[in-house]
Amino acid sequence: MNRSKTPRTRSRSRECRTATSRGFTLVELLLVLTLTASLLGGVISLVSIARQSSLEATQNQLHRQEIRRFADDVRRDVRHASRSVVKDGELVLTHATSDRTITYQIGEESLVQRRLVESNDSAQSVDSYTFGKDAKVNVQWLEEIRAVRWTIALTQRPQQPIEILASERSTRE
């Protein structure tokens, strides 16, 4: 009888040991939680960086589109103007045939406004161009080639300014 009791107690102790060894220790759980938290933090920071980069790329694209729109308008207006005058950061274009005046005025360094005024003052329109935060805009008249040069220095690339040349139509046509 004694022999039959002994194996039962031994088997119970084995069952108890295997039951407790199936779980995780506190150190193992803390290690897994720490690794998971650090991986999650890394993923969140990567998503944040990607989102910020995407936002900056979108803003840069909008600024480039605005500069293209401005360049197209300036070139068209200067080409059709009969007289161009640059004075104090302002470009004034007059059209002899249609009696209208177009004025490009530099505002708060990164803003340029275009005003179109007809001779009868009944028709006036205003258009604005914004080139980004803290962009420096400058205009000058180049007499030797009868052209206007606009210089736009963006804060991201101050050493590489964007230059827009707009020349008057040749009178030799």
Image (cartoon, grey):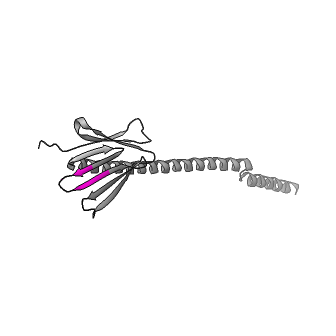
Q: Nearer the viewer, residue 87 or 56?
A: 87
Give the image quarter of residue 120.
Answer: bottom left
Q: Nearer the viewer, residue 139 or 133?
A: 139
| Rendered location of residue 169, percent (x, y) | 18, 45
Q: Quadrant of the C terminus?
A: top left
Which residue is at a point 63% across and 47% down the rendered structure image?
A: 35
Which residue is at a point 31% across and 51% down the rendered structure image?
A: 103
| Rendered location of residue 170, percent (x, y) | 16, 42
Is residue 100 shown in magenta?
A: yes
Q: Residue furthest bottom?
A: 122
Examine the rendered structure and indicate whether residue 154 appears above or below residue 21.
above
Main SS of the magenta segment?
strand
Q: Nearer the viewer, residue 15 or 162?
A: 162
Range of the magenta residues? Answer: 93-103
Residue 158 left/right relative to 171: right
Q: Residue furthest right?
A: 2
Which residue is at a point 25% across and 41% down the rendered structure image?
A: 147
Q: Quadrant of the N terminus?
A: bottom right
